[in-house]
Amino acid sequence: MPLYECRCERCEFTFEVLAPLSSFGMKSRPCPKCGRAARRIISAVAFTVEGGARASSKPDVTQLKVPPPARLCWMDDRSAARYAAHKHGRGAEYDDQMHAREEAQKKRGAPPPKPAAAAHAHSHSSLADPVAYAHRRDAAARKAKAAESKEVTRRPRPSA
């Protein structure tokens, strides 16, 4: 049977009513204090799952993802998850949860997790990109040619 929450507008009393599903259509109940009709109101809902644990509306803080454009190239998966948790305002929760996991691993005698290598196949120099290098080389050649043509026009002409 669902548990409904009702509020009496006259005496401002809020109470709960355990009612069968067949009475779903009833939008009001009598107030236990004054007897007038009290309207059903929306209230928080809690569901239970197997094992009796409450389901949370928030995803696991250690599983948050960073959008690819925001992920820096040096970030391993753990760094990206921590960054995402901090961006969602749950950084302290992430740090606490990861610390608790590490402590539990130490108690079990398991070796600490090895940080993933942050190797990536590109350089951060703009000259390492062949296309960028070609553009810069062409721009330098055009600039040199323009400077040379200005120099030719500035040379004094021999007088006859």
Image (cartoon, rainbow, N blue to C red):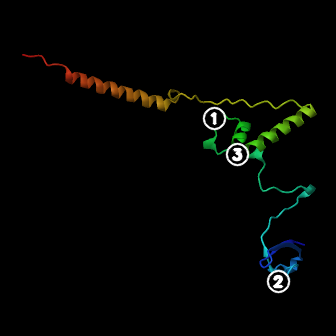
Q: Is residue 121 left or right of residue 31?
A: left
Which residue was labeled with disc 2? Answer: 36
Disc 2 and disc 1: Cα gap in Å?
A: 65 Å
What is the secondary structure assignment of the residue under circle 2? Answer: loop
- On residue 65, the disc is 3
- On residue 129, the disc is none
Disc 3 and disc 2: Cα gap in Å?
A: 51 Å
The spot of residue 56 in percent (x, y) is 81, 55
Task: Using the rendered image of the protein, determine whether residue 25 is visible from the camera's viewpoint.
Answer: no
Question: Tag 3: Cα neighbours inside 10 Å, few (<14), some, or many (≥20)?
Answer: some
State the quadrant of the C terminus. top left
- Report the residue at 44% width, 29% height from top: 134
Q: Is residue 133 left or right of residue 54?
A: left
What is the secondary structure assignment of the residue under circle 1? Answer: loop
The spot of residue 150 in percent (x, y) is 25, 25
Amino acid type of disc 3?
A: Lys
Q: Is residue 114 left or right of residue 119?
A: right
Amino acid type of disc 2?
A: Arg
Viewer-nearest residue: 92 or 47: 92
The spot of residue 143 in percent (x, y) is 34, 27
Amino acid type of disc 1?
A: Cys
Vertical arrangement, residue 156 with respect to residue 114, above or below: above
Task: Using the rendered image of the protein, determine whether residue 70 is visible from the camera's viewpoint.
Answer: yes
Dividing the picture into quadrants, the one containing residue 109 is top right
Viewer-nearest residue: 13 or 139: 13
Q: Earlier in the sequence, mark 3 or mark 1?
A: 3
Which residue was labeled with disc 1? Answer: 73
Observer-side mark, 2 or 1, equals 2
State the quadrant of the N terminus. bottom right
Vertical arrangement, residue 71 with respect to residue 152, above or below: below
